[in-house]
């Protein structure tokens, strides 16, 4: 049976992951509106990965004979600005998620819930990738600038991203 405090933070984490999906979807719609289909694709693929992150937590709580408690998902606000500004928001958001995951790991240790501690390792590794993915795009946008010709080429690159379902087992 899952530790109750850990169950609470994992339920809160489900909400954060689904909020992340909403955030990326809102960004995808914005990029589509301003004609950047590759950026729109990249963020839409990321939204699907965030749904996977939420579902893996959902399945784990059930697997541990715990209780899933869903909560309201906030609507993302202020989705506007240049691609660089949006990716800086993404990077800040992923660092926030990393902090949240680290707290779950630390609490799992404190509560001696080692199954949860072992489970959350997958998310710790995933967050390294999530932060790096956003940071690489920020570096490109800073290195090559954000004039229309450069954005056109970066947009084409980001069109290549495809969705692969995530699983922690
Ligand atoms: Fe599921 Fe992007 O953190």
Image (cartoon, rainbow, N blue to C red):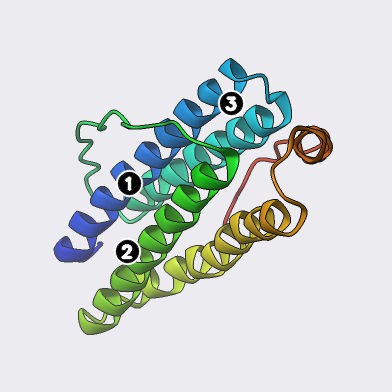
| Displayed quadrant of residue 33 | top right
Above or below residue 73? Residue 96 is below
Point out residue 19 in the picture as x, y percentages from the top left corner.
35, 38
Residue that numbered label 3 is attached to: 31
Instruction: Residue at the far front: name it.
Output: 147
Question: Residue at the location (45% across, 74% down)?
Answer: 118
Point out residue 35 in the picture as x, y percentages from the top left corner.
67, 19
**Cα–Cα span, label 1 and label 3:** 22 Å
Label 1 vs 3, first from the N-terminus: 1
Is the Cβ of the residue at disc 1 closer than 8 Å to that at disc 2? yes
Q: Quadrant of the N terminus?
A: bottom left
Point out residue 30 in the picture as x, y percentages from the top left corner.
52, 23
Label 3 vs 2, first from the N-terminus: 3
Looking at the image, which is closer to me, 114 or 57? 57
| Eye-nearest disc, 1 or 3 | 3
Q: Is residue 33 visible?
A: yes
Residue that numbered label 1 is attached to: 16
Is 42 situated left or right of 1 in this image?
right
Point out residue 13 in the picture as x, y percentages from the top left corner.
31, 52
| Displayed quadrant of residue 69 | top left
Is the Cβ of the residue at disc 3 closer than 8 Å to that at disc 2? no
Task: Please tell me how crowded label 3 is: few (under 14), some (14-19), or many (20+) other residues with Cα within 10 Å.
Answer: many
Say what secondary structure mark 2 lies in.
helix
Label 1 vs 2, first from the N-terminus: 1
Say what secondary structure mark 3 lies in.
helix
Return the mark for residue 100: 2
Q: Is residue 169 visible?
A: no
């Amino acid at each position: 049976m899952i530790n109750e405090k850990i169950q609470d933070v994992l339920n809160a984490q489900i909400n954060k992951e689904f909020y992340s999906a909403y955030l990326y979807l809102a960004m995808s719609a914005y990029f589509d509106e301003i004609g950047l289909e590759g950026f729109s694709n990249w963020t839409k693929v990321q939204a699907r990965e965030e749904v996977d992150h939420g579902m893996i937590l959902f399945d784990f709580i059930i697997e541990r004979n715990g209780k899933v408690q869903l909560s309201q998902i906030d609507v993302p606000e202020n989705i506007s600005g240049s691609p660089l500004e949006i990716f800086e928001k993404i990077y800040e958001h992923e660092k926030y998620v990393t902090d949240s995951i680290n707290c779950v790991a630390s609490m799992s240790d404190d509560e001696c819930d080692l199954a949860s501690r072992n489970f959350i390792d997958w998310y710790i590794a995933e967050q390294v990738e999530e932060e790096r993915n956003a940071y690489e795009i920020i570096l490109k946008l800073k290195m090559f600038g954000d004039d229309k010709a450069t954005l056109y080429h970066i947009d084409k690159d980001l069109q290549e991203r495809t969705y692969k379902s995530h699983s922690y087992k």
